[in-house]
Structures are given as C-alpha cells and as structure tokens.
Amino acid sequence: MAQDQPASCKVKVYQDSRESLCLWGSSPTSGIAFSLREVDREDLEDNILAANQDDTVDGIIVYYPIFNSRQDQYLQQLIDTSKDVEGLSHRYVFNMYQNIRFLDDERLQKSILPCTPLALVKVLEYLKVYNTILPYGNRLFGHTITVVNRSEVVGRPLAALLANDGACVYSVDVTGVQQFTRGEGIKKRRHEVVEKEGWTLEDCVPSSDVVISGVPGETFRFPTRALKEGAVCINFSTEKVGQVLLSQ
C-alpha cells in the first residue's frame, strides 16, 4: 500500500525492487503474488483493516512516511501480526529488543525482523563474520562493531540485533556514543545499553572489526584514516542528487 501522492525517489526504488522480486518468484510453485494498492492517506486506516480481514492477503507492506508523525506509528500497529511482513508491530519489536527469537514454545516460527537490519546481518553472515562454531545466538562473540546511525528504523534495531548475537556494539549518532552488549562474557540474556560519555567516532573505530555506516547527507564524511586494518566496512545510506540515488 502507498499513499496516493507522487512517490519519492527512494520509495519508488523500494516499490519497484519489491515488485520485481515478487514477479521473479511468482511461479506456480513459489505462490508469491504482488499487488500494489494506491490509496489516499485519509483512507489508509480503513484499507489496512480491510486487508487484515481479506483471506486473499497474506502480507501487508505500507510505504512510509505517510503523515510523518506519530500517526504513522499508529498505522503500523493496525496491521495484523500474522500479516506484518516488515516486523513493525509491537510484538515483533518487543521480541527483537528482548532477544526473543521465536513466536512459539516449539521454536518453529521465527519472530519477524525489520528488513534492512536483517539484510545487514545476512551480509555479515555471508562474509563469515559470524562464527558458526559458536552456539546459535552467540556467534558474534569477540567482535567489536561500530554502527554510525541510531535511527529507530535501522540503526538502533541493528545495534540491538548485533549485540544480542554477542558483539560489543558502539552505536554512534549526533548525540554521542552508546555501547550495546550482553555484559562481560555475554552472560546476560539480552543486551544492555551504556552511555559512553565524551566518546566520539574516533574512539570507536580503531578497535572495530566491523564498521557499518548509514548517514545520508552531503556534509558527513567518514574518517577512513581511523579504520583498523582488515576491518569489514559496509554503507547502507544513499543521497539523492537530481534524479539519481548515490551511495555515500
């Protein structure tokens, strides 16, 4: 679903890529069918409630921002948990921060995670940053990771996921540095957050095995001179220049 307004460049990219992926996989065996429903934002609430009751709809995606206010959070909570494929409902967000990985006692149904933080985790798995010799849930133990972004959409969830997997994570934004860990020897069940008073990016980067940056904007430049030799570096931000999206 998307509001009936001219889509921003970034939203259009998301929309087209999701449609392409679904169409690529929409064979009789995959069972995936993509349908875009463009509605006026004042009608979106009723459309979400209707989709919740529609047995032909298995998953719902809403392209935000809609109102660019707390009303968007209200709309996120309207989506039925069983159809929330973005992991934005309260139950999924609670599970993510509490390090609860399954919805059932039998541990058969995984809790949904937000797509961009999960994609970054998958990149780290592909690069073999995760140590598969260690038990599931502890496979980042021994790694120090800096995440330059603490938005509620990507940065904070990502820091929580990485810390819950055993890493020492430094979360950096314009307000300062926070450390996400499961305590010494990863003895805690879930991560805890500690303010690092007086710390800056220059204090985090030299000790980090992995650096993940997501700061859109022309003025920000990452201090690459501070990078540890051999560090894994990932950027997920883009900047619109004219009609072109550029990676920072």
Image (cartoon, rainbow, N blue to C red):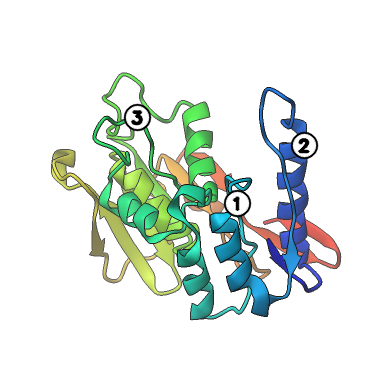
- Please report the residue visible at 66 percent of the width from the left and 31 percent of the height from the top: 31
Give coordinates of residue 186: x percent, y percent: 18, 40
Tell me the kind of residue under disc 2: Leu
The answer for how far apart the CA atoms under marks 1 and 3 are is: 31 Å
- The first of marks 3 and 2 along the sequence is 2
Tell me the kind of residue under disc 1: Phe
The answer for how far apart the CA atoms under marks 1 and 2 are is: 25 Å
Q: Please tell me whether mark 2 sits on a helix, a strand or a loop.
A: helix
On the image, which quarter does residue 197 sit in? bottom left
Which quadrant, please, contains the C terminus?
bottom right
Image marks 1 and 2: residues in contact by CB distance under 8 Å: no
- Please report the residue visible at 51 percent of the width from the left and 50 percent of the height from the top: 83
**Vertical order, 179 against 229 (above or below):** below
Which residue is label 2 attached to? 23
Instruction: Judge whether residue 204 can be spotted in this image.
Output: no
Give coordinates of residue 222: x percent, y percent: 56, 58
218 horizontally vs 191: left or right: right
- Please report the residue visible at 80 percent of the width from the left and 66 percent of the height from the top: 241
Which residue is label 1 attached to? 236
Q: Which mark is residue 143?
A: none
- Of 123 and 146, nearer the camera is 123
Give coordinates of residue 54: x percent, y percent: 59, 53
